[in-house]
Amino acid sequence: MSRTARSRGEGNSFLYAQSFAGYTRHHSEPFQLMAKAATPLRIAVLLSGGGTSLENLFAAIESGLPAEVVCVLSSKKTAFGLQRAENHGVPGIAIPRRGYSDVRSFNDALHCELDRHEFDLICLLGFLSPFELRGRYAGRTLNVHPALIPAFCGKGFYGHHVHEAVLAAGVKLTGATIHFASDDYDEGPILLQGSVPVEEDDDVERLAARVQALERKLLPAAIRLIAEQRVVIEDGRVRILAARND
């Protein structure tokens, strides 16, 4: 199919993405996600580090998750996540944030590279630079946050900083959130959440390991819901449809 018929990076859900962006500005009725998504769901991953979540995603796919990773972009050329991608035969592309004078020009480069690939969904898996949706990726970009949004989130709350804040606050529960990204830090409709206890003898490493184990379950579950066309956004909130008995 030619670029005039369908641009790369826009996939089968391009019309959905544009419709969603405009629809939510003018309507309060439900809107179903990925009504025309490909099977398996094609995923572009953005990361900045070791790629542990990416490796877990590959494992879930090998275990039957109806998805495939088509490209991995990193904001750091030394990120081990790029090697993990190559190990699985997936293109790993470094677009170093330091090579650009500002966030906008960096995002110009990201979008240019994304245009080279066909995918249905973007997953931000430890991506530490701002990603501008620019309308076209609204409603089809998932972010994984290592806490229960709206707590311990926003600018500066990433990685170990989140768990340090959780321990300092003395809360008894924390968790992980899978949500649709917006142009603001850690905002956007929440798709899935799960909780884990904060133990009395926890340090950052032990707590992080417990949260990461939860993320390994939540992310594949979220992707499966989208692949099965069971996700509806209504008034800025996610509603999950019952499984079909086909």
Image (tube, rainbow, N blue to C red):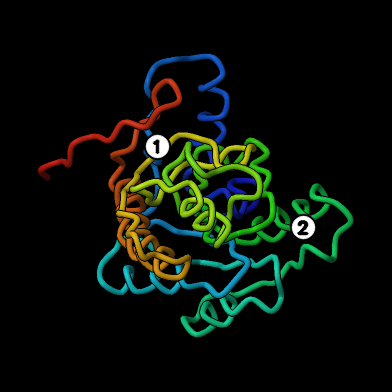
**Amino acid type, mark 2:** Ala
Q: In the picture, which quadrant includes the C terminus?
A: top left
Pointer 2 local density, CA inside 10 Å: few below 14, some 14–19, many at least 20: some
Which residue appears at 77% of the width and 57% of the height?
109
Which residue appears at 28% of the width and 35% of the height?
240
Rendered location of residue 7, percent (x, y): 62, 50
Residue sitting at the far bottom: 87
Rendered location of residue 91, percent (x, y): 58, 75
**Amino acid type, mark 1:** Leu
Instruction: Describe the element under mark 1 as helix, strand or loop.
Output: loop
Question: Which residue carries the number 1 mark?
Answer: 33
Question: Which residue carries the number 2 mark?
Answer: 109
Q: Which of the 4 image quarters holds residue 230?
A: top left
Q: In the picture, which quadrant includes the N terminus?
A: bottom right
Instruction: Describe the element under mark 2 as helix, strand or loop.
Output: helix
Rendered location of residue 145, percent (x, y): 48, 51
Residue sitting at the far right: 101
Please tell me whether residue 65 is drawn above or below residue 23 in the rendered image: below
230 and 143: which one is in front?
A: 143
Is residue 55 toward the left or the right of residue 230 in the image? Answer: right
Which residue appears at 31% of the width and 31% of the height?
239
**Mark 1 / mark 2, whichever is N-terminal:** 1
Q: Is residue 19 visible?
A: yes
The residues tagged by marks 1 and 2 sit, at their Cα atoms, a distance apart of 27 Å
